[in-house]
Structure formats: structure tokens, C-alpha cells
Image (spheres, grey):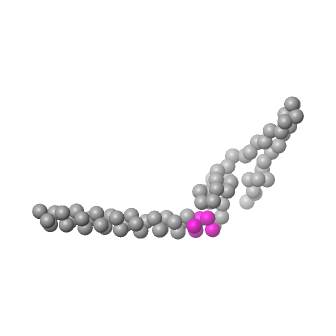
Amino acid sequence: MVSIRSKVINSIKKDGSVMVKVTPHKHCIVCGKAVEPEEVFCSEECKQKYESARKRQWIPFVIFFVLMIILIAYSFMAV
């Protein structure tokens, strides 16, 4: 994989200023490093961190869902 940083192209304008052209890229959704447009993560480590965080976010959702089912079932039993 070629680094995005190595693809930066400098060109000099007529007035002497430098214009920097950056190739199309995206950023890693975990750490923010530049990656190729078709990639989502910069490394396997970031991919594993993302998957781990997704699993941890799932647990509170399931607990909330189960508690709501219990509360709804209890409210129908009370009537």
C-alpha cells in the first residue's frame, strides 16, 4: 500500500506560491489517518478496535430491550 502522504504533489504558481494537490482519500473511522478511498480502516488494529467497540455498544441495547419487554409485560399483568 502506497502512503497517501507520498502522493502529495507540489506545483509552483506563476506568482511563486506553492499549490498543493492532494489525491482523493478518506480517513480511518477509528484514528483519523488518511487511507485510500476504497478503504475504511488504516490497519488491522483499527479494524479490531472498531469491532470491539461495536460489540460493547450492543450489550446495553439488549439490556434496555429486555427491560422494556419486562416492563410492558408487567404493566399488562397489573391490569
> Which residue is painted at 73% across and 46% down in the image?
23
Q: Is residue 46 magenta?
A: yes
Toward the viewer: 5 or 16? Answer: 16
Q: How many labels were placed on the picture? A: 0
Residue 35 position within the rendered picture, expressed as x and y whole percent measured from the top left: 67, 55
Which quadrant would the C terminus be assigned to in this image? Answer: bottom left
Answer with the quarter of the image where residue 62 lies. bottom left
Left of 26 or right of it: where is 53? left
Q: From this viewpoint, which residue is outermost toward the left?
A: 79
Residue 61 position within the rendered picture, expressed as x and y whole percent measured from the top left: 39, 64
| Range of magenta residues | 45-49
Residue 59 position within the rendered picture, expressed as x and y whole percent measured from the top left: 41, 68
Q: Compared to 12, does 69 lie above or below?
A: below
Residue 73 position within the rendered picture, expressed as x and y whole percent measured from the top left: 20, 65
> Which residue is painted at 43% across and 65% down in the image?
58
Left of 8 or right of it: where is 16? right
Q: Compared to 19, does 57 lie above or below?
A: below
Which quadrant would the N terminus be assigned to in this image? Answer: bottom right
> Which residue is painted at 30% across and 67% down in the image?
67
> Which residue is painted at 80% across and 38% down in the image?
19
Q: Compared to 56, does 40 lie above or below?
A: above
Q: Is residue 29 magenta?
A: no
Toward the viewer: 77 or 26? Answer: 77
Magenta stretch, main secondary structure, is helix
